Amino acid sequence: MLRSLRQIDPLNLLSTSKDELWVALRLRVRSFYKLNSLSLGIEDHKYLVEREYGAIEELIFGLLPNV
């Protein structure tokens, strides 16, 4: 069963490599928007992944004390 981001220990997220996080976010965006070639172009997909990555970074550092 999937856990929400609020239930995940932020220190564990720091140990996750940037590449692993990037791949997970790409899959999340693709799955969420059910991408096909007609709905969104590759630049739109990149933009959405970059926004998700920025948001997850803010979440991680917002949850960590004294960072």
Image (cartoon, rainbow, N blue to C red):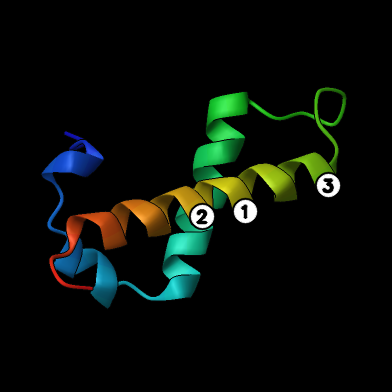
* Residue 55 rendering spot, x and y as whole percentages: 45, 48
- Name the residue that disc number 3 marks: 43
- Name the residue that disc number 1 marks: 50
**Quarter in which the N terminus is drawn:** top left
Q: Quadrant of residue 5?
A: top left
Element carrying mark 3: helix
Tell me how far mark 2 sits from mark 3, CA to CA: 17 Å
User: Do labels 1 and 2 touch, CB within 8 Å?
Assistant: yes
**Quarter in which the C terminus is drawn:** bottom left
Task: For label 1, count other residues whose C-alpha is less than 10 Å away and answer few (under 14), some (14-19) or many (20+).
Answer: some
Q: Is residue 9 left or right of residue 31?
A: left
The one of 31 and 51 positioned closer to us in this rendering: 51
- In the rendered structure, which amino acid carries the disc numbered 2? Gly
Q: Nearer the viewer, mark 2 or mark 3?
A: 2
Element carrying mark 2: helix
- Name the residue that disc number 2 marks: 54
